[in-house]
Amino acid sequence: MQITEIRIALRSDDKLKAFVSVTFDDAFVVRGMKIIEGKDGHLFVAMPSRKKPDGTYQDVAHPINVDFRQFLEDQIIIEYEKEKMNQPA
C-alpha cells in the first residue's frame, strides 16, 4: 500500500494546525485527520473519530501497528511543513 496523495488544509487555531486527507493507492481516502500541537509544542496526527453516547471519542479509522502509524504521521508532518512554507507571509 502506498500513500498517493496527502491534502493539507491549514488552520490558524492555537492547537488545531490543519485538517488532513490521505489517499492510498489512488483508490481509498481517509478524511478528517487533524494535525494538533500538543502542550510541549510537539505536533501529532489525530485520527478521524466520532463521539460516543458516553462522551468519549472512538477512532473511525486508524493504523493497527506502531510502525505504520509512525510512517503515516511522518509523511503527513512532512507535507504539513511544505504547505506552511508555501503560504504567503
Image (tube, helix red, strand yellow):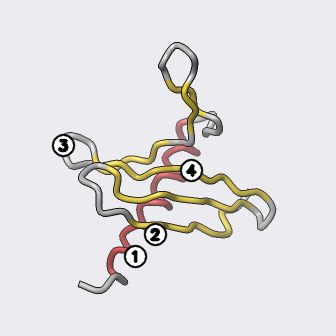
Q: Distance between the Cα atoms at labels 4 and 3?
A: 23 Å
Residue ranking furthest to the right = 27
Nearer the camera: disc 2 or disc 4: 4
Residue 9 location (% of width, % of height): 47, 66
Label number found at residue 79: 2
Up the image or down, 56 lies above or below 76; here it is above
Nearer the camera: disc 4 or disc 3: 4
Given residues 58 and 42, the one toward you in this image is 58
Residue at 53 percent of width and 50 percent of height: 33
Task: Identify the image quadrant of the C terminus.
Answer: bottom left
Residue at 61 percent of width and 38 percent of height: 62
Which residue in the protein does label 3 denote? 40
Label number found at residue 32: 4
Q: Distance between the Cα atoms at labels 1 and 4?
A: 19 Å
Q: Distance between the Cα atoms at labels 2 and 4?
A: 16 Å
Which amino acid lies under the numbered mark 2 shown in the image of this protein?
A: Glu
Which amino acid lies under the numbered mark 4 shown in the image of this protein?
A: Gly
Helix, strand or loop status at disc 2 = helix
Which residue in the protein does label 1 denote? 82
Given residues 38 and 31, the one toward you in this image is 31
Q: Are marks 1 and 4 in contact (CB under 8 Å)?
A: no
Q: Are marks 4 and 3 in contact (CB under 8 Å)?
A: no
Given residues 73 and 48, the one toward you in this image is 48
Residue ranking furthest to the front = 53
Residue at 41 percent of width and 60 percent of height: 77
Up the image or down, 8 lies above or below 64; here it is below
